[in-house]
Image (cartoon, rainbow, N blue to C red):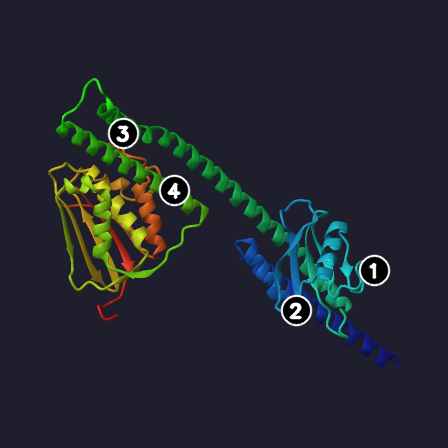
Amino acid sequence: MENGLAAAQIASLAIQNGLTYLKLTALAAFSRSLTLTSDLEQALEVIGEHLEINFHRAAAIFLPADQGTSASLVQRFRTPDFSVTAKELEGAVWCWQHGQEAGTDTTAVPDALAHYHPLAVRGRVIGVLGLKPRPGAWFSTQQRELLAGFVGQSALAIERGLLEQRVRRLRFLNESDLVQNALLAAVSHEVRAPLAAITVAISAMLNPIAPLDRVHERQLLQTAEYEAKRLHRLMNNLLNVTRLQAGVSRVRLEPCDLFDAVGAALEELGTLAQTRRVSIEISPDMPLVPMDFELIKQVLINLFSNAFKFSLPDQPIHLTSHLVGGELDVSVFDRGRGVPLEDLDRVFEKFYTHAESSSADGLGLGLSICKEFVEAHRGRIWLENNPEGGTIARFVLPAPISPEA
């Protein structure tokens, strides 16, 4: 009899130890997975995945809508079979506000279908975990202990993700302030120059005391037109920067003729392009290329503008384009002063101008916008120094491999 009782006790102890081992193994695997996550969304996915593996129940995670203290909770993760009704949200909110379990099998919002657990760190509730029980399958003591471990680790991982989000947001706001300050400082100078030139031209033409002959009138009109287009391009660049920062720019890929895009860019540059020697070398059998016509036209305008700006008026500008390994390769050659080797990558930074640039050379936005637009097409853009003197601005876009593609 005593031997039989001892054997039963040993078996019971072995079962308990076995369950403890399994619990520790599950928690260790959960912890390892959480350490590999880099942000809040990944952490929520990992938590949901391990809840499904270990408890086989529908689950949802709720977090404050504004990370503040209002009564607004939003569901940030749920398994497909967890329906968030008004009653379930009521249970989650009660759990969050009171820091106590709620929902089914409790006295707080007992008619909710899920059981809600507060996710707390150092006594502060940062979210709520909801689990729906399976009919007739309640948690055992061991499962409750395992769940308590999961809840604690989940709360720590979520807090870490929320803190990282706040850090990123603060960094973004700081960078946005720097950009806005730079924009305001630059605009105060850059806008005044073309406006002053336009005002002077118009005032001279309207001056009744000193009437102008037709030659001088035409020169002033050309000056006003040039400065107005310069101002228009400046405003476009500023608008593009704002749209890119806000994330509202969208690439609309349609089959386009590169020759048409080049022609449209030169036409928009007007007199600035007409007074320069520009040669275009595009294969006559070049296929239509998937691109956003307006965005690539702006890329070409900025590259041509730089080539005109940084080379002497009597120097030629040359554009070539061909297909290489399923990519459209476009190059703009100038014979200007070139770019120092150490600056070839930095020229794509916003507001960057190298030491030899004058204040008349612009905001330093053109190439950064080119980079944004080309990369939005899943392409690449870079600068090279021209062996014959000057600079080569090159970009590549994904393109059909053959004209029949």
Q: Are marks 4 and 3 in contact (CB under 8 Å)?
A: no
- The label nearer to you, 2 versus 3, is 3
Front position in the image: 262 or 228: 228
Disc 2 marks a residue whose amino acid type is Asn
Crowding at dot 3, Cα within 10 Å, few <14 / some 14-19 / many 20+, comes out as many
Q: Are marks 1 and 2 in contact (CB under 8 Å)?
A: no
**SS label for mark 4:** helix
Crowding at dot 2, Cα within 10 Å, few <14 / some 14-19 / many 20+, comes out as some
Q: Earlier in the sequence, mark 2 or mark 3?
A: 2
* Residue under pointer 1: 107
The disc label shown at residue 239, or none: 4
**SS label for mark 3:** helix
- The label nearer to you, 1 versus 2, is 1
Q: How many marks?
A: 4
Crowding at dot 4, Cα within 10 Å, few <14 / some 14-19 / many 20+, comes out as few
Q: Earlier in the sequence, mark 1 or mark 3?
A: 1
Query: Residue 242 appears at what percent x and percent y?
Result: 41, 42
The disc label shown at residue 388, or none: none
Query: Residue 294 appears at what percent x and percent y?
Result: 31, 52
**In the image, is residue 202 above or below residue 322?**
above
Front position in the image: 294 or 186: 294
- The label nearer to you, 4 versus 1, is 4
Q: Are marks 4 and 1 in contact (CB under 8 Å)?
A: no
C-alpha separation, residue under disc 1 versus residue under disc 2: 26 Å
**SS label for mark 2:** helix
Which residue reaches farthest right?
Answer: 1
The answer, for residue 256, to whether it is visible in the render is: yes
Query: Residue 83 appears at what percent x and percent y?
Result: 66, 66
Left or right? Give the position of 71 relative to 233. Answer: right
* Residue under pointer 2: 54
Disc 1 marks a residue whose amino acid type is Thr
Query: Residue 163 appears at what percent x and percent y?
Result: 58, 46
